[in-house]
Amino acid sequence: MPRKAVTPRPAASGRDQQMEQLVSSFFQLIGEDGSREGLVETPARVRMAVEEVFSGYRQDPKKILKTFTKDVCKEMVILKNCEFYSTCEHHLFPFFGHISVAYLPNRRIVGISKLARLVDCFARRLQIQERMTAQIADAIMDVLDARGVYVMCEATHFCMTSRGIRKQDASMVTTAIRGAFEKSESLRLEFLAAVTGNISVK
Ligand code: ZN
């Protein structure tokens, strides 16, 4: 069934109006007619999209990572292939891809969905991929007091595929390695085997 077009919410505050005004000014600057049918509601839509895409500024990583001290295991815990969507702070273009996160528990563990929320908390801001990868690792080390963290992120950057050097198939991979993972090659290999290979649990 075709989805019904949703009418955007009207601006509720001075801040909302300012945001919509910015979008209207942008139309003028690029030579568009903001009063034509297709664009009339766009400033309100952009404002609502911006609220969602940059919602990470309103989140606190410490509050997201609710930890448990019961049933703590010693072995590696992995969130594999978690998709994310972020915005490059140099061009305001999207970059997106997948992140895998592993940690070695110490005295605390965390719900796996909380790790995914942590990824979004840092992704939904103006970012560079290197910093986002490091921030996720450091937050887990800090809040969980983990023995080690390994974060690997692979992303496609619109600022590279759609403009500039225009490389369609290139992706960027960044890693952040902390604690016991820095010292142990076997731990790093265990992580890499888990996130790059197919693990079958039978
Ligand atoms: Zn960029």
Image (cartoon, grey):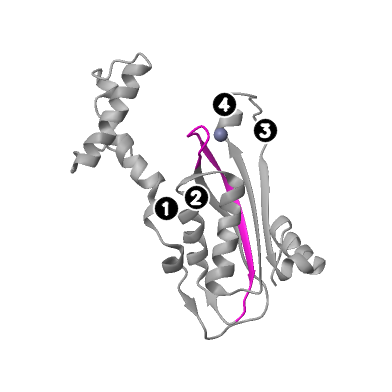
Task: Point out the stretch of residues depicted in magenta.
Answer: 87-106
Residue highlighted by disc 2 = 123
The type of residue carrying mark 4 is Ser
Q: Is residue 190 above or below residue 134?
A: below
Residue 118 vs residue 62, the one in the foreground: 62
The quarter of the rendered structure image containing the N terminus is: top left
Going from the N terminus, do you reach mark 4 or mark 2 first?
2
The answer to whether the residue labelled 3 contacts the one labelled 4, judged by CB atoms less than 8 Å apart, is no
x and y percentages locating residue 81 in the rendered image: 60, 55
x and y percentages locating residue 100 in the rendered image: 62, 58
x and y percentages locating residue 134 in the rendered image: 60, 55
Residue 44 vs residue 177, the one in the foreground: 177
Going from the N terminus, do you reach mark 1 or mark 4 first?
1
The type of residue carrying mark 2 is Ala
Residue highlighted by disc 3 = 169
Q: Residue at x 52, y 86 (%)?
A: 70
Judged from the image, the quadrant occupied by ligand 1 is top right
Going from the N terminus, do you reach mark 1 or mark 2 first?
1
Q: CA distance from mark 1 to mark 3?
A: 28 Å
3 or 2: mark nearer the eye = 2
Residue 162 marker: 4
3 or 4: mark nearer the eye = 4
Q: SS of the residue at dot 4?
A: loop
1 or 3: mark nearer the eye = 1
The answer to whether the residue labelled 4 contacts the one labelled 2, judged by CB atoms less than 8 Å apart, is no
